[in-house]
Amino acid sequence: MTAAIEATALTKRYGRRTALHGVDLRVEPGRVVGLIGPNGAGKTTTMRILLDIIRPTSGTVRVLGDDPREAGPRLRRRIGYLPGELIMDSRITAGRLLTHYAALNGEANAAPRIGELADRLGLDLRRPVTALSKGNKQKVGLVQAFAHRPDVLILDEPTSGLDPLVQQAFLSLVREATDEGQTVLLSSHVISEIDQAADDVLILRNGRIAQVSTVAEVRAAADRDVRVTVRAVDAAALTGHLERLPGMSALSTQHAGETVVLRGRLSTGLDELVSALAAQPVLDLVVAEPDLERAVLSFYSDAATEQTGGAQ
Ligand SMILES: Nc1ncnc2c1ncn2[C@@H]1O[C@H](COP(=O)(O)OP(=O)(O)OP(=O)(O)O)[C@@H](O)[C@H]1O
């Protein structure tokens, strides 16, 4: 099957700074892929190359099987793009601006769809765009990206500046888009958003792909917080067991009257914990949902260390 988005050995240099070092990526049709990574990792650069806003130093890209450098407006109409930095200083109304964009994308009768999207995101189409707040400008950008029902959506930090209710409305737009077979590549620093919206996650760090996996795989590999409550008389034996458990760290004990609460962090599966507990009288056990945020945080802190070390 032709990939919706494909990049091979993509390198981008801005003068002496290398923003992308031979990035390979592939997004299958109908998937929602979250592109995450620290500031300066190369997310916006990657997206701009896919739109042919900037050109790579070397390497190739294909969007819907076409080279964006050659396919021009024909391909551009099949892509919905939300730039990371929106510049909207026009005095015309949001409604007129959006109708204009839709016409450029080949949609002569886009008003009903624009009206529906604006309603769902809570955008007043009668106001001049220059007078809109940051969040409302972001809504204009989102309506513009979704209005022509493109085959591929490339969204650079789509929920930046949106309030939580509008963020939920955005997530439902993404779900509907994929129900209709559209492909979505979105960058975000809000990991919970990637967790809710994406099928796959692509982690960029210092211009290189650090990890490609499904969101479910990242979550399954994440540490879990564990809390076990036992009677005080049983605590010493159990503490010994848990301390020796492979993958257990940060174990602490807290005495509360007749009971003791043991807390720890588990980096492996639950089998061995369950076996260890089977031999003990346990009053309560809580195993927290694995946390995607914590699983990807190490990529951010390692990148900061590399940057401090002068990595280019
Ligand atoms: N026009 C430019 N001229 C010079 N360097 C640039 C330019 N655009 C980006 N860069 C550099 O390229 C690297 C990648 O930047 P990019 O904007 O792609 O990162 P990002 O992952 O989108 O970051 P953020 O999360 O901060 O938006 C950074 O080091 C940045 O400083």
Image: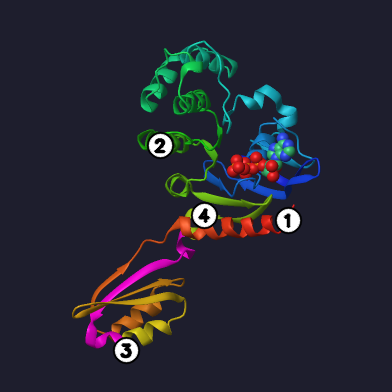
Q: CA distance from mark 2 to mark 1?
A: 36 Å
Rate crowding at label 4 as few (under 14), some (14 to 19) or many (20 or more) other CA atoms within 10 Å.
some
Q: Residue at x 56, y 17 (%)?
A: 89
Residue 34 drawn above or below residue 164: below
Residue 106 drawn above or below residue 21: above
Mark 4: which amino acid?
Thr
* Mark 2, secondary structure of its residue: helix
Rate crowding at label 1 as few (under 14), some (14 to 19) or many (20 or more) other CA atoms within 10 Å.
few
Mark 2: which amino acid?
Gln
Question: Which residue is disc 2 drawn over?
Answer: 167
Q: For marks 3 and 1, give the one nearer the viewer.
A: 1
Residue 70 drawn above or below residue 277: above
Q: For marks 2 and 1, give the one nearer the viewer.
A: 1
Residue 144: percent from left, percent from top: 51, 23
The tag earlier along the polypeptide, 2 or 4, is: 2
Q: CA distance from mark 3 to mark 1?
A: 49 Å
| Circle 4/circle 3 CB separation < 8 Å | no
Question: Which residue is disc 3 drawn over?
Answer: 237
* Mark 4, secondary structure of its residue: strand
Q: CA distance from mark 2 to mark 4?
A: 22 Å
Question: Which residue is disc 4 drawn over?
Answer: 214
The numbered dot on residue 310 is: 1
The tag earlier along the polypeptide, 1 or 4, is: 4
Q: CA distance from mark 4 to mark 3?
A: 39 Å
**Rendering quarter of residue 85:** top right
Q: For marks 1 and 4, give the one nearer the viewer.
A: 1
| Circle 2/circle 3 CB separation < 8 Å | no
Residue segment shown in magenta: 219-237
